[in-house]
Amino acid sequence: MSTHTEHAIFHPKAARMDLPGIRRVSLDQPFHWLRDGAKDMVRAWPLSLFYGIVFAILGYALVHSAWDKPHLAMALTSGFLFVAPVLATVFYCVSHRLEHHHKLPSLFVPLLSWRANPSSLGLYTVMLVFVLISWERMTAILVAMFLSGSGISLGELLTLSAVQQHPDFFLAYLAFGGILALTMFSVSVVSLPMMLHRKVDFATALVTSFMATRLNIPVMLLWAALLAGLIGVGMATDFIAMALIFPWLGHASWHAYRELVERE
């Protein structure tokens, strides 16, 4: 059980927005979220494992379908981090039920959790599509500028020798990708579970998420590093480990939201 009652609550102000209180949490909280997420995954293992396998297969298929097109494969690989919070809504639904000691939903019910707030989630999806298209174009531009004519494949690109031969490309890729990833993380880490849990509008959810990140910068940087690192492990195993890692992080993200945002 999270120790949210021990943390101070701040009430941010924003014009024409009724924002909930936000907690300032301690640096060790991300590890508590991972612990609570693991507990939820064990309690709901049939659902968690099923969706974990489905999303792992989906990720594998997306990345490997573009393996011979480096810019597209790289965009899809990094884009998986942007899409992950949306896919994780099924785990938010399950953790919400576990929190209130409700019976686990049937197999496909979590896929319908978007119906709790369709307009806000729809706007988030539109924003995400725009971000993914923009990132794919940016990746194509970087590949054309720095790797044009090299004939390098994605497999060759993901080697130490490639990093040594094309340091300018990797620095530019990491710079642009890092800024975009941190921006998306700051507006997504709380907003999606919040939109599923409360009838809030799209803007209020994004601002709340940004405020929660801003108030807990060291904690959220650690949380982002843990998420990216574990997802990286899942990808490095050809998405095999992702079947367990993805549901684990999905359940843990629900607990992060419940800890960071004041309860109604």
Image (tube, rainbow, N blue to C red):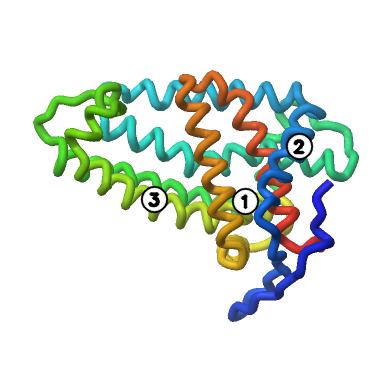
Q: Is residue 112 visible?
A: no
To which quarter of the image does residue 190 belong? Answer: bottom right
Judge by depth and name the residue closer to the eye, 195 or 185: 185
**Disc 2 designates what residue?**
94
> Going from the N terminus, do you reach mark 2 or mark 3 first?
2
What element does badge 2 sit on?
helix
222 lies above or below 146: below
Rendered residue at 56%/27% (across/down)? 55
**Disc 1 designates what residue?**
192
66 lies above or below 183: above
x and y percent of residue 2 in the render? Answer: 80, 50
> Going from the N terminus, do you reach mark 1 or mark 3 first?
3
x and y percent of residue 251 in the render? Answer: 70, 39
To which quarter of the image does residue 143 belong? Answer: top left
Q: CA distance from mark 2 to mark 1?
A: 14 Å
Amino acid type shown at disc 2: Val
Rendered residue at 57%/43% (across/down)? 85
**Disc 3 designates what residue?**
178
